[in-house]
């Protein structure tokens, strides 16, 4: 019995030691879980805070990008409007250039016609001068001829008067 009691005691001590070891292991496990939980909760909290901060930054960047996109869209619309206005003005300018070229051509033709008209006028003026000189010469001839006619009439009248006085015909 004494051997049995020593065995029972040693079994009881072993049972107790095993229970203590299990208890220590359970406490260690609980403390480990508590430590890991605290660590992961702290890590999760840090990650969550960092995520929230980055989400806030991302929201701000998204807002900035949206504003920039709106500004870019407005700028693009302004550029398109300006481009259309420039194209319209270029069309008007081209129309004016075309009209100007036509007017230059007409002006050139009119200049040529004016030069021809001046030349014709100069020739006509020269011909008129010649004709006026001829008319003046003819008028002098007419005056001389009228004077001769008067002279011959008076001679004829004198000859008739003399012939009548002498009793004849002339």
Image (cartoon, rainbow, N blue to C red):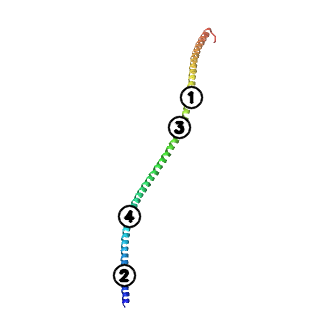
Residue at image mark 4: 50
Q: Nearer the viewer, mark 1 or mark 2?
A: 2
- Spatial CA distance of label 1 from label 2 is 145 Å
- Spatial CA distance of label 4 from label 2 is 48 Å
Q: Position of residue 24 (x, y in %)?
A: 36, 78
Residue at image mark 2: 17
- Spatial CA distance of label 1 from label 3 is 22 Å
- Front-most of residues 83 and 94: 83
Give the mark nearest the N terminus, 3 or 2: 2
Vertical side of 107 occupied by 57: above or below: below
Q: Nearer the viewer, mark 1 or mark 4?
A: 4
Q: Quadrant of the C terminus?
A: top right
What secondary structure is marked by label 2? helix
Give the mark nearest the N terminus, 4 or 2: 2
- Spatial CA distance of label 3 from label 4 is 77 Å
What secondary structure is marked by label 4? helix
Q: Which residue reaches farthest bottom?
A: 1
Q: Nearer the viewer, mark 3 or mark 2?
A: 2
What secondary structure is marked by label 1? helix
Q: Which residue reaches farthest front?
A: 2
- Spatial CA distance of label 3 from label 2 is 123 Å
Q: Quadrant of residue 126?
A: top right
Residues at discs 4 and 2 in contact (Cβ within 8 Å): no
**Disc marking residue 119:** 1
Give the mark nearest the N terminus, 1 or 3: 3
The residue at 38%/64% (across/down) is 50
Mark 3, other Cα within 10 Å: few <14 / some 14–19 / many ≥20: few
Q: Nearer the viewer, mark 1 or mark 3?
A: 3
């Amino acid at each position: 019995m004494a051997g049995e009691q020593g065995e029972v005691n040693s079994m009881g001590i072993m049972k107790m030691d095993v229970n203590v070891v299990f208890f220590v292991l359970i406490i260690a496990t609980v403390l480990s879980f508590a430590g890991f939980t605290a660590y992961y909760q702290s890590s999760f909290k840090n990650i969550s805070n960092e995520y929230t901060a980055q989400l806030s930054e991302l929201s701000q960047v998204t807002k900035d990008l949206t504003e920039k996109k709106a500004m870019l869209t407005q700028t693009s619309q302004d550029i398109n409007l300006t481009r259309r206005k420039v194209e319209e003005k270029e069309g008007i300018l081209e129309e004016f250039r075309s009209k100007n070229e036509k007017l230059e051509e007409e002006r050139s033709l009119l200049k040529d016609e004016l030069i021809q008209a001046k030349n014709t006028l100069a020739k006509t003026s020269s011909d008129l001068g010649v004709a006026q000189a001829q008319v003046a010469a003819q008028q002098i001839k007419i005056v001389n001829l009228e004077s001769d006619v008067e002279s011959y009439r008076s001679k004829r009248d004198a000859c008739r008067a003399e012939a009548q006085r002498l009793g004849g015909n002339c």
